[in-house]
Amino acid sequence: MAQVTLNKVIKRYPVGDVLAVDHLDLQIADGEFLVLLGPSGCGKTTTLRMIAGLEDITGGDIHIGERRVNDLPPGDRDIAFVFQFYALYPHLNVRDNITFPLRAQQTPKEEVEKRLQQVAKQLRIEHILNKRPGRLPGGEQQRVALGRAIIRRPQVFLMDEPLTNLDAALRADMRVELKHLQQELGTTMVYVTHDQTEAMSMSHRIAVMHVGVLQQVATPLDIYNYPATLFVGTFIGSPPMNTLKCKVQQNKLIGIDTAFQLPLSTLPAELIAKASTQTLVFGVRSENIHLQPGVNAGDLQGGILVREPLGDETLYQVQIDDYLLTVKTPPQQVFYPGDAVSLTFDRDRIHLFDAESGRSLRVTQGGAHV
């Protein structure tokens, strides 16, 4: 096991002068499950491939444990890489696919068989050891790919969207299994995904990236509750955070392109002190807005435009003049299109971001940083 440290790591592609990763500072603790999260093209897979040695770095340093690995080939870094596509040898059975790395290292046969049985038991694939990968469903193929990585006992596991090709039910099962496996092995794991559900449910910490820049590193709950940037706030969460450009005027937040108005007294004290006449972005999550019938109370008044019952919750699109807010309520609270409602915000769950830089005006919490 080992920690992984990236210090001011840069990746620039000369063709088109594309800056894929921009001065990335990241420390992954020994035994940590860290998820690199972001949309396509944000630099997360490039970062993973640089750790693995599959991509040369343009600048900075990468350490695995105490070793600086910038110039080491992948085979000398003591890592195991699990790809999105399983990359199994179709002419070999499961047994030979899993043990291939050990046989290539000329590991004694007794040790190879001992490790094979341990891995097969961990992954519950003892019954398919003599089958070929092409005859297996996707979930079992993924287990075989994991087994081939685990049997080497590397210092670091690197995983590039390994569950993307599985159906929704199987992905949910594999999330649980991967999390349990990482806890059991205690090995450092760096996992790339664009799926926030995977990131939130599996990781110890999440590193959110956008256009090659690290936006925030924190625990899943701190990422959700205390987004350090506007991008993090809107990327994490379903439905996305409600946002609105506004400015401070006459002790109110005034919407720039809409009739939205909110008294400053509604905001948390730490935000009131920092709010100014600069252009801001108001943000609030759908579950932090509460609806009451009628227009005699609350912070704002509006009308129900759309109702979306989802079983365990209901989403409402609430129209406030020419602005729409998404509100999440328990299923037993029922309104219908056309109903007049009052809206109340959870005071300590309101966010303000600088419109130019995107940075939150809140004090970062839980180790969150940009």
Image (cartoon, rainbow, N blue to C red):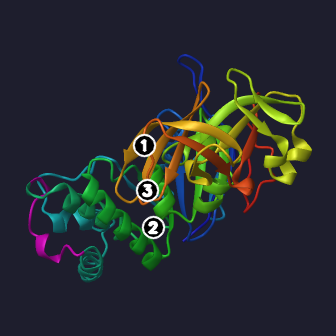
Helix, strand or loop status at disc 1: loop
Q: CA distance from mark 1 to mark 2?
A: 57 Å
Instruction: State the residue in front, 1 or 108.
Output: 1
Residue 275, quarter of picture: top right
Q: Amino acid at mark 3?
A: Glu
Q: Identify residue for label 1.
A: 336
Helix, strand or loop status at disc 3: helix
Instruction: State the residue in front, 289 or 111.
Output: 289
Pointer 3 with pointer 1, Cβ within 8 A: no
Q: Identify residue for label 2.
A: 154
Instruction: State the residue in front, 215 or 227.
Output: 227
Q: In the rendered structure, which disc, 1 or 2, sits on the residue that comes first in sequence?
A: 2
Q: Identify residue for label 3.
A: 198
Helix, strand or loop status at disc 2: loop
Left or right: 194 in relation to 349: left
Q: CA distance from mark 3 to mark 2?
A: 23 Å
**Which residue is drawn at the image coordinates 63% and 43% (left, top)?**
295
Q: Position of residue 180 (x, y in %)?
A: 40, 74
Q: In the rendered structure, which disc, 3 or 2, sits on the residue that comes first in sequence?
A: 2
Q: In the rendered structure, which disc, 3 or 1, sits on the residue that comes first in sequence?
A: 3
